[in-house]
Image (cartoon, rainbow, N blue to C red):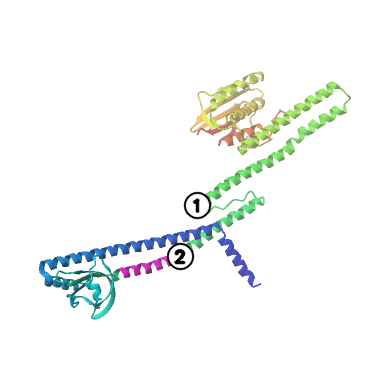
Amino acid sequence: MSDEPARERFSALRRLFRTTAVRLSAIYIVVFTVFSLFLVVAVTHEAARVVDRQLVEAIAVEVDTLLDDYRDGGLVRLVTTLDERARRPDAGLFYVVDPNGNPVAGNVAELPLQAVIEDDDEPHRLAYSRFEDGREARHVALVRSFTLENGFHVLVGRDIGERERFRSVFRKAFRWIAGAMVVLAGLTWWFLARRVLKRIDQVSEASRRIVAGDLSGRLPVSGSGDEFDRLAVSLNDMLAKIGELMKGLKEVSDNIAHDLKTPLTRLRNRLEAALAEPEDADGHRRALEAAIEESDGLIRTFDALLMIARVEAGSSLATADEVDLAEIAREVGELYEPVAEDAGVALSVEAEGSVKLVGVRELLAQALVNLVDNALKHGRSEGREAKVTISVGREGDRAVLSVADAGPGVPEADRTRVLDRFTRLEASRNAPGSGLGLALVAAVARHHRGTIELSDAAPGLMVTIRLPTA
């Protein structure tokens, strides 16, 4: 039992190191460490190379100066100059021996004789001893030897201890920097991994609730505006849309179960009555014609439901293009003018000029047809002139389409409800229709990112659709 917590911790660590966030963090640490190591090594090498070049140039200058002094004042002048330079705080190495190898001048305690008497065109490394504070100390220098005309040998050099100390400082600094970098990278890795994993766990938990059927669940948004917030906002919008579609599907199912049950029952009863009557060709024909008419109404209802579903899902086969809303209004007005004249309704179109927007022409025309058809059916009232007016205009950056009638109108409390599927007010129960006309109009308006509003036409009802022109 005591091993169970340890196994759980080990399992949690295994899950942690299998995550993409941890793997990416580890890759970043390795890459950053390698790059930093390369940078430090490159800088150290380049700095050492520059120091070496400066030492070589300094030795060449010293050699040229001593040769000039020898030519101007002979050996005495050269030894005087060498002795003067040897006393400087930043003095280099100076050593002079006679043709027999006996030291004459210099600031070096001991040097191999062979290194002094052999002439060199390029400096080379040499271990030597020199006096510091009255005692002998071992050093390494870059040296160059040359022989004078009188046989004396001169050695000039520069100590490279400063360069070695420079490299030592760099190595020590790199160790400290590398250690601090690894620690900071580890802490950053741990913090980011925990933060990312926490956000992912929150998303996973919310997703599990949504999969379990809770479509009201939403992904958490921290408010930081990072990529997780942007992803959560997009997914929440998608979930809201899915929730609306599921709600619509449920409403359609419920409405079909209630509103289509009556016409189906009526169709069945008519057929049963036709079968129960004596064989009568005319009676059977009338029954079949009534059944066909009832079936056509059911087909129109299902077609309307299918169109509404397709519009709300954004899966309309027609593509959006630039259309002229005023032209559509004039065409629909011309189409319904004979129908309105037969019904004794005065139909007028107020659509001068051009009102263009980007939309699906077929859907906009169908929405306007539904509005005009509703106005012709329900826009009558006792004692008033029956009239229907189609208007198209602009309000700022929006196109405005409205259809007004002179009928009894819709009570303010019912103006939102009538936009739902299968909603029919009591006044229109006896009129033909399925209660889907305004629902389709509302779906088309939403599809075009517009709004629909029902208002009082004083008298009558006015349905106004506002659509963005751009």
User: Residue 453's spot in the image, x, y percent?
Assistant: 58, 34
Image-based side of 45 in relation to 154, left or right? right
Residue at (15% x, 69% y) in the render: 149
User: Residue 190's spot in the image, x, y percent?
Assistant: 51, 62
Q: Amino acid at mark 1?
A: Asp
User: Residue 53's spot in the image, x, y percent?
Assistant: 27, 63
Q: State the extent of the magenta-drawn residues as a range.
A: 163-185
Residue identifier under label 2? 182
Quarter of the rendering containing residue 294: top right
Magenta stretch mostly in which secondary structure?
A: helix
User: Residue 418's spot in the image, x, y percent?
Assistant: 65, 35
Q: Amino acid at mark 2?
A: Val
Residue identifier under label 1? 226
Q: Nearer the viewer, residue 314 or 249?
A: 314
Residue 454: tell me if it is visible.
Answer: yes
Q: Secondary structure at mark 1?
A: loop
Image-based side of 149 in relation to 23, left or right? left
Q: Is residue 394 above or below residue 196?
A: above
Of label 1 and label 2, which has the lower sequence position? Answer: 2
Q: Is residue 464 above or below residue 13?
A: above
Q: Is residue 234 above or below residue 416?
A: below
Per the model, the C-alpha gap separating discs 1 and 2 is 26 Å
- Residue, far bottom: 135
